[in-house]
Amino acid sequence: MTRSRRIPLPIIASFVLLGLMVMGSLLLAVRLTANNDDLVAVSEYRRAVTDVVNAARDAETGQRGFLLTGDEKYLAPYEASVSQIAPALARVASREGARGMRVSAQLKTLLDGKLEELRTTIELDKAGRADAAIAIVQNDGGRVMMDRVRAIAENERRWGVARTNELTDSSRTLLRLMVVGLVAGAAAVILLSLLWLAQARRQYAEVDRARGDAELSLSALKTEVASREKAESQVRQLQKMESLGALTGGIAHDFNNMLAVVLGGIELAKRRLRSDPDKADQLLDNAREGATRAATLTARLLAFARNQPLAPTPLDVNKLVGGMCDMLHRTLGEAVQVECVYGAGLWRCYADPGEVENAILNLAINARDAMPQGGKLTVESANAHIDDSYARSRPEVTAGQYVLICVTDTGSGMSPETIERAFDPFFTTKPVGKGTGLGLSQVFGFAKQSGGHVAAYSEIGEGTTVKLYLPRFTGADIVDPVASVPDALPGGVSTEVILVVEDEARVRHYAVDALRELGYTAISAASPAEALRALDEQPEITLLFTDIVMPEMTGRQLADAAAIKRPDLKILFTTGYTRNAVVHNGMIDVGVAFLSKPYGMRDLARKIRDVLDGGGVNRTV
């Protein structure tokens, strides 16, 4: 008997509310990041103005030392200070937009006059006209110009302090809004779920009472039939309550974990906002990652609720499956034999190609997990017709012509009880931490939203077959668009040895595993000192893949030290920071290969291949 899979309005409302909460948190996190960037920019602007004044003052000190003593050793600091003024003025002009350009122009006008005075007095003194030089110094013109320079610098210092306080207050307000919004949103979602749970329990109780009253009125001849129906009803009710418990428990568990990341990151960022803006930026990135994971979970739940946006198109399933076959070989591992069987004369279906790929991949991964010792996975396409008899037995199915995708494994199989609940959200037979229970429910929601059908057939010890029916496309005969199948990842060979230097253990393990998956020989070091020892002990290392921000020394310093040992060594930097030893003003230094965190396997594969095949040799900057 078919069970209702409709999602109640309060649950959908809670998902929408949570999605809005996550989007709001992302927007606030972006605003906080922008505030941090502005704080850094104001600090650099103030430092540049101070450098201009200090350089002018030092130049004046060198000039006076020369005039008083006649010793040309004072000209060296004078000339060094003069050479620093132009770069410092350029830094002033490049920051804070129109304000920086205006202040730079004012300072340049004053300092041009002051430098001309300094140059004239030195030339007069060298020509033996010391009296004329002293007369110019005693004139108030130079002093007045320096006083105006100092006044401008003091005015910019006061502006910088006021601007810093303004940005800090704004960031604090944003942090408070994020905390309040997240807590209120989470509380609202939990409250809506609890209210619906209470309502469902009351409804189930009323149904039981009504059924009991009806059964009491049955004749003695129907007593046995009535008791059987009651027992079956109780079993179905128990299954529904278990599904509800899995749904609410799964939501609470996953979102509590994600909210812990978001709230914890925000709290720490609030503490570091003044003392360490870069660290605060990193913590906010972690919070944004937690919010993004929550958004991904919301998308999966919406897929089950059939509320995800789809872009259906006429689709050649044979081309799509053919393009995925190699990817499935790599994804499932050597222990699983993958066979793709293409139906002859296959109709086109009408579905979202990206979601079809996701559905096949979800089914393939579930099949792999059911074959821990290895086995065979078959992906098959065929034309199918669902007749009226089958449709009558399943009210949610419409009779008609479909394109069928069968995913069959030789795994452990499922019991009838497990099959009955296989498409319920958060239901999983995998150990804790090994699965979310959303893969099959996402396939189910996609099939229903596409006007199709999905069914599972399984026997314990014999394996499982999942059949995905997608509606046949009967429109005009046009050229099918090419299925969106990911390009193959560029890989390497075992003779290409990569040294991964990363002080964060989880990131280091991911990078090593990904590189080995791509075919490289990967070794790791948890610190720069350990990396230098590895370079001494293993001359076959081809490329150094290093984080930039680490204890002991930076990745830039490590690369410089490694270049002394191995001038031909290829270098690839990575970091989550945007301001560090190889990135300045948003631009990567010339001659430096750089991969920004967070990076996926595809980005890593392409960048490693580019560096090995092209540039990436360490250059001093």
Image (spheres, rainbow, N blue to C red):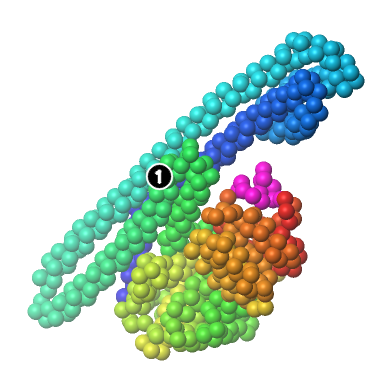
Report whether 341 appears left or right of 263.
Answer: right
Give residue 290's position: percent from left, percent from top.
45, 54
Find residue 70 and report its horizontal and vertical position in percent: 81, 23
Q: Position of residue 547 (x, y in %)?
A: 59, 58
Foreground: 343 or 21? 21
Magenta range is: 578-589
Q: Residue at point 48% right, 49% down?
A: 283
Q: Residue at x 64, y 18 (%)?
A: 151
Quarter of the picture holding the N terminus:
bottom left
Left or right of residue 296: residue 339 = right
Q: Main secondary structure of the magenta part?
A: loop
Reading the image, the residue beneath label 1 is 267
Given the image, on which type of amino acid does mark 1 rest? Glu
Q: Secondary structure beneath disc 1?
A: helix
Q: Nearer the viewer, residue 611 or 382?
A: 611
Q: Is residue 496 visible?
A: no
Is 308 inside the magenta-drawn segment? no
